[in-house]
Image (cartoon, rainbow, N blue to C red):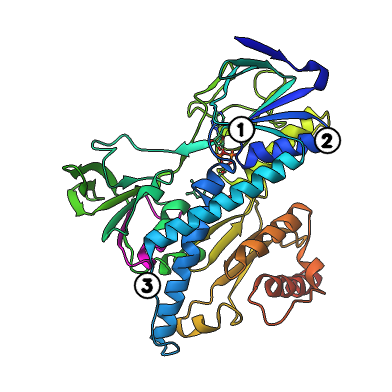
Amino acid sequence: MKVARFSDHAMIVVLGGGPAGRIAAMHLAHSGKEVLLAERGVIGGQCLNFGCMVVCALNDAARVVRNARDLQGLGVIDRAPEINYPGLIREMQEVQKKIAGILDSDTRSTGVEIKYGTEAVLHGNEVRLGNEVLRPDAVIAATGSFPAIPDIAGIPMDGVYNPHTLAQMDRLPGKMVILGGGVMAAEFAYIFSSFGCDVTLVARSDVLKVLDDRQRAIALQELEGVTVHSGTSLLAVNGDRHLGSVSVRTPDASQTEIECDALFIATGLSPRSENLHGIAKGPGGEVLVDSHMETSIKGVYAAGDVTGPPYLTPVARHEGIVAAENILGRVTTMDYQFFPQSVNLASEHAFCNPPAGGTVSVSLPGPAGPGTFWKVPYNATGLSKVSVDPETGLLQGVSTSGPGAGIITSYIAFLMQKGYTADDFSSFLEVHPETDGVHGLLTYLSDYLKRKNSG
Ligand SMILES: Cc1cc2nc3c(=O)[nH]c(=O)nc-3n(C[C@H](O)[C@H](O)[C@H](O)COP(=O)(O)OP(=O)(O)OC[C@H]3O[C@@H](n4cnc5c(N)ncnc54)[C@H](O)[C@@H]3O)c2cc1C
């Protein structure tokens, strides 16, 4: 076995080329470090290959079909298009390859060396890459996560998919069961129901609990056409060589069979840490880190999904930066208080509601504008809600559903983190027409609090 030492060059090894590992590697290389990035598969991690970008590809197409159907319903257009599913998957994969090429060359352009195709194994502060043993000055383990698959009789079986195997589904199923009640399950339910599949969502508890009541009601309206069984658990998948049905237990404890030709498992993610040895882990396999993203071994850091929830790309990237900064000797801590999130259905449902007491909240339906004008007849222009501290006016929460909700919420979350108040928005000027209700609510709150606190 070859033992390589890099101490002359302050060599850093990063395990995993997903959002956390890639950003960390580039950040270190920008600062002059010699960095080796080991990726066993394709650069970009789940975000590019199985997650966020897949949802974007499919959701963009789903919205075209849904919006066209809505316009047809109003007599604005004559015909709505149909999805060419094999074409959609083929072209999505072409775009993914193109993005992977860009990520690869961007990463290399900073000086990072990328080694593909080998499963890296960590033993304490030593990294094994095939026959090579590396003793780097620092390590970042960013090996991500994988779909959590429930231990159910009959899985795996033809016709049962998860986000990592979805591209193997070569045609649209007539009847599809989606297992899960979270963001991922709801997003795929919207997509496949828009594509014309008869979708049943089977969720152990309530669907989209992550949203507050009013935003959730709007999101559930967008799942119109999807049969939702909440409080229901999957017992078995049934079929001969190919899936034919699933057996479920309903809230009244009775057992029912749901006929289907595809089951999509969207029950969340689990940390991928089976190749990380000698560092402390939690009960779910998540690598335990301190606020600097350092593991139980000095000089060995971990970032991204492998450290456990929240499983979000921006959080993974930021953890990667925090780990890199600490390796560079600049003491930095990770703050999880203000991360925005979104659920993408017919519209974006974004929110950032850090826990805080003593809030006053106001809400308002979304205005008509670009992307919502033709939603007016359907009473589906969305909603915005803002919460502030009644004494100080400090921003304490935002939820907004409508076009650009993700972008609006990202900036508001940042302003919340910086300690902005409703009053800071009193001179806000927007582009018109646009569909953001948040700034209107904040200027209203600014006036309201001034009146309330002066009298
Ligand atoms: C269906 C779905 C939808 C999602 N939608 C969103 C969304 O809308 N917004 C959002 O913010 N997040 C979303 N996510 C979550 C997001 O994809 C992850 O949080 C993000 O990819 C985590 O980045 P990471 O770098 O920690 O891990 P990963 O993306 O999992 O990357 C880890 C990388 O490490 C590699 N690797 C693993 N083990 C080894 C090893 N031993 N040696 C070498 N390489 C290894 C893997 O091949 C992989 O490339 C979604 C996820 C899924 C599955």
Q: Residues within 10 Å of mark 1 (few under 14, many from 20)?
A: many
- Out of 236 and 272, give the one closest to the viewer: 272
**Residue beneath label 3, please?**
82
Please state the quadrant of the image where ligand 1 appears. top right
Mark 3 and mark 2: Cα distance apart in space: 50 Å
**Residue at the image position 41 percent from the left and 90 percent from the top:** 75
Mark 3 and mark 1: Cα distance apart in space: 40 Å
Identify the mark nearer the N-term, 3 or 2: 2
Identify the mark nearer the N-term, 1 or 2: 2
**Magenta-tinted stretch:** 190-210
Mark 1 and mark 2: Cα distance apart in space: 19 Å
Q: Position of residue 31 (x, y in %)?
A: 83, 35
Residue 79 circle label: none
Asked whether residue 202 is drawn in magenta, I would say: yes
- Out of 59 and 206, give the one closest to the viewer: 59
Question: Marks 1 and 2: which is nearer the front?
Answer: 2
* Amino acid type at mark 3: Glu
* Amino acid type at mark 2: Ser
Q: Position of residue 80 (x, y in %)?
A: 39, 79
| SS of the residue under disc 1 | loop
Q: Residues within 10 Å of mark 3 (few under 14, many from 20)?
A: some
| SS of the residue under disc 2 | loop
| Quarter of the image with the N terminus in it | top right
* Amino acid type at mark 1: Ala
Position of 5 with respect to 281 (left or right) is right
Position of 134 with respect to 177 (left or right) is right
**Residue at the image position 51 percent from the left and 31 percent from the top:** 272
